[in-house]
Amino acid sequence: MIADVAGLEVRVAFGDVWKESLTELSGGQRSLLALSLILAMLLFKPAPIYILDEVTLLWFPAFPEHLLLMTSSFCKRLASW
């Protein structure tokens, strides 16, 4: 018996390299991807306040810069509403 499974298909690229599977991602890349999905969902239903706790815990030195770019872009999009 084949079960119908509905889900979310995620394709990820860091730079020019597309990942075949989410298992290929490092801990920092997974954190960045998770935060990206959260921010994307919050664009549809914004909250009045956001608290991010230890978001850079597992990240490499370059990722805090990516976090800053993502959150500033997110805030600009919310401000334009």
Image (cartoon, helix red, strand yellow):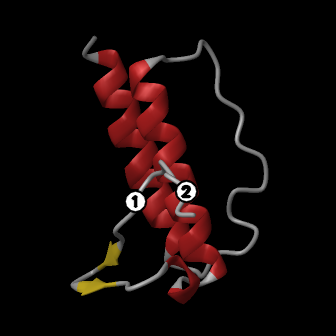
Q: Nearer the viewer, mark 1 or mark 2?
A: 2
Asked if the residues shown at circle 1 and circle 2 are in contact, with their CB atoms under 8 angstroms apart, the answer is no
* Res 26 quadrant in image: bottom right
Q: Residue at x 34, y 68 (%)?
A: 11
The spot of residue 31 in percent (x, y) is 61, 64
Q: Residues within 10 Å of mark 2 (few under 14, many from 20)?
A: few
Q: Real-space Cα distance between discs 1 and 2?
A: 17 Å
Q: Quadrant of the C terminus?
A: top left
Examine the rendered structure and indicate whether residue 2 appears above or below residue 7: below
Q: Report the front residue among 76 and 8.
A: 8
**Amino acid tagged 2:** Ala
Image position of 8 (left or right of 60): left
Which residue sits furthest left? 16
Farthest front residue?
Answer: 1
Amino acid of disc 1: Glu
Tag on residue 9?
1
Name the mark on residue 41.
Answer: none
| Circle 1 SS class | loop
Sequence order check, earlier mark of 1 and 2: 2
Residue at the (33%, 17%) spot, across then down: 79
Residue 71 is situated, as x and y percent measured from the top left of the image, at 45, 43
Between 17 and 6, which is closer to the camera in this rendering?
6
Task: Report crowding for label 1: few under 14, some 14 to 19, many 20 or more residues within 10 A (C-alpha).
Answer: few
The quarter of the image holding the N terminus is bottom right
Residue at label 2? 3
SS for dot 2: loop
Q: Is residue 37 above or below residue 58?
A: above
Image position, residue 42 (x, y; %): 49, 28
In the image, taking residue 77 as reference, residue 30 lies left or right, namely right
Looking at the rendered structure, the number of numbered marks drawn on it comes to: 2
